[in-house]
Image (cartoon, rainbow, N blue to C red):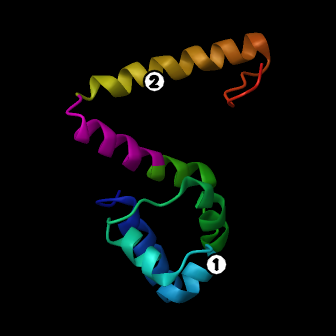
Amino acid sequence: MKEHFGVYIKQLRAEGGFTLTQLGAKLDLDSANLSKIENGKREFDEKRLNQLASVFNLNIENLKAEFFGDLFAKKLYENHCSTDALFVAEEKIKYLKQINVKQEKLNFTKGND
């Protein structure tokens, strides 16, 4: 666990021997934006998680855990929530999985009737 997800990316980049420009190109980001992400001044776009996993040959589930764990922690902290919210979220996930099994698939996209 790192201070924030950007520090995790910075460590991966350094260990992989990439410059900001090189990794940015692989993630369709310019080096300035990647630098802001690494320094915690900008959020990493979850749509790029698969690209990041591919570049560094990472397990996508572990990468998602790091990314979303960071995201959830920030939101809870910013909103002065207790960690009880994590337990509530876990129960809601169990419920959604149960409903999903019963209905075969939930569709959370907008505009679908």
Q: Quadrant of residue 35?
A: bottom left
Q: Quadrant of residue 37?
A: bottom left
Where in the figure is residue 68, as x and y percent of width and height?
Answer: 46, 45
> Are there few (<14), some (14-19), or many (20+) residues within 10 Å of tag 1?
few
- Look at the image and tell me whether residue 17 can be seen: no
- Look at the image and tell me whether residue 22 can be seen: yes
Q: Is residue 31 left or right of residue 35?
A: right
The residue that label 2 is drawn on is: 90
Residue at disc 1, secondary structure:
helix
The secondary structure that dominates the magenta segment is helix
The residue that label 1 is drawn on is: 26
Residue at disc 2, secondary structure:
helix
Chain part drawn in magenta: 68-81
Is residue 43 shown above or below 26? above
Q: CA distance from mark 2 to mark 1?
A: 34 Å
- Identify the residue at horizontal 39%, vertical 19% (top origin): 88
**Could you tell me the amino acid type at mark 1?**
Lys
Q: Which mark is residue 43?
A: none
In depth, the one of 27 and 13 nearer the eye is: 27
Is residue 97 shown above or below 42? above
